[in-house]
Image: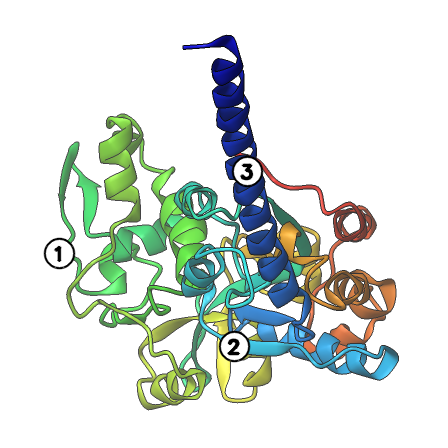
Amino acid sequence: MSGDRQGRLAFCTCRGVLEMIKHLLLTAFIIVLSVNYATALRDEIRVVGSPEVLPYVQRVAQNFTLVSEFAAPSLEVTGTGNGFKLFCDGIGFEYPDINAASRRITDSEFAVCQTNGVEFITEIAVGLDGIVLANSKAPKQYNFTTAQLFRALAAEVANHGQIVKNTSVTWHEIDSALPKIEIKLMGPPPASGTYDAFVELIMEAGCRDFSKIAGLSPDRRFEVCRNVRKDDAFMMGIKNDGLMVKWLQEHPDAFGILPFLLWQENDDIIAANPINGVSPTAENITNGRYALARPIYLYVKTKHVDAVQGLQKFLYEFTSEHAIGPDGYLAQKGFIPLDDQGRNSARDAALSLAPISR
């Protein structure tokens, strides 16, 4: 083959490769442009999450629309767990921007987010909440410990050096100071952050008081500490808060695990029992004395901030002192504020949007 022909062939080959690269780059640019264009058009912030946290989000949203030019955010009550499922499904127009959660994201939820491309997540602790052990105001109230509650509600318990099935029928069998009434407790719905708080703050905390359980292997200890009874002593909760309150009124010897705010709204007809000698009050939750307290969070997709109009300004509004401060407008809805340092950390997170890592 002549040198001239070889040169022409090489030139054609190179030009073909260049054209192919040019075509691929153009295609990639069009795809990126299409995605950015679609997401940039979204002028509505989408929030999913806990029924305990969304009332506060709704109140902030009302103020946000009054003081800004942005549309009112869209709110969907899903529960914390289902909220994370939707939140972690992906990045883009059809996915939520914020999950309003009554607990922290779990390692497994975080891993699902990463797998689906939700790589950069900002965690903002915005306030405090608690759960209460409530009953009808008709009977007397009792001072329970987390150890007593674990002993009454766990599927398996320590007895004479062995781990055995829990067969206790009355509270009096758990402790002679407790009443001779049947153990009957309505727990939170299993997909809720309140249920997760119940497991962590009651079951796992109470479990630590039993040395026999502490000596088990980590996997077995995890199982014993978290598994609740599946008989009539413990019933999974009613999703409708009003029905839960009504059920407690109709069953004066029964107890229920409720969010602090729900009890506050109905404290004329249901009572909250002290835990470990401390009553559930906003002050005791704030100062850390009440054992069943927990932070509440906003989880934000960092990549959505530039694509969804007003998203970061909404975070500024939510974390502002006139919203989450002790005298802020959320306090009128029963919101329990963080201390000064906690509120400053919330504002720093809203400003920096630093992603969490695991």
Seen from the viewer's position, the closer of residues 11 and 141 is 11
Residue 224 position within the rendered picture, expressed as x and y whole percent measured from the top left: 24, 42
Q: Residue at x 48, y 26 (%)?
A: 13
Of circles 3 and 2, the one toward us is 3
Read off the residue under disc 2.
76
Q: Which mark is residue 42?
A: none
Q: Report the quarter where the N terminus lies.
A: top left
**Earlier-in-chain disc, 1 versus 3:** 3
Q: Secondary structure at mark 2?
A: strand
- The answer for how far apart the CA atoms under marks 1 and 3 are is 76 Å
Q: Residue 181 appears in which quarter of the rendering?
A: bottom left
Q: Nearer the viewer, residue 247 or 354?
A: 354
* Residue at figure coordinates x 31%, y 79% from the top left: 253
- Mark 3 sits on what residue? 19
User: Which label is found at residue 167?
Assistant: 1
Depth check, mark 1 against mark 2: the one in front is 2
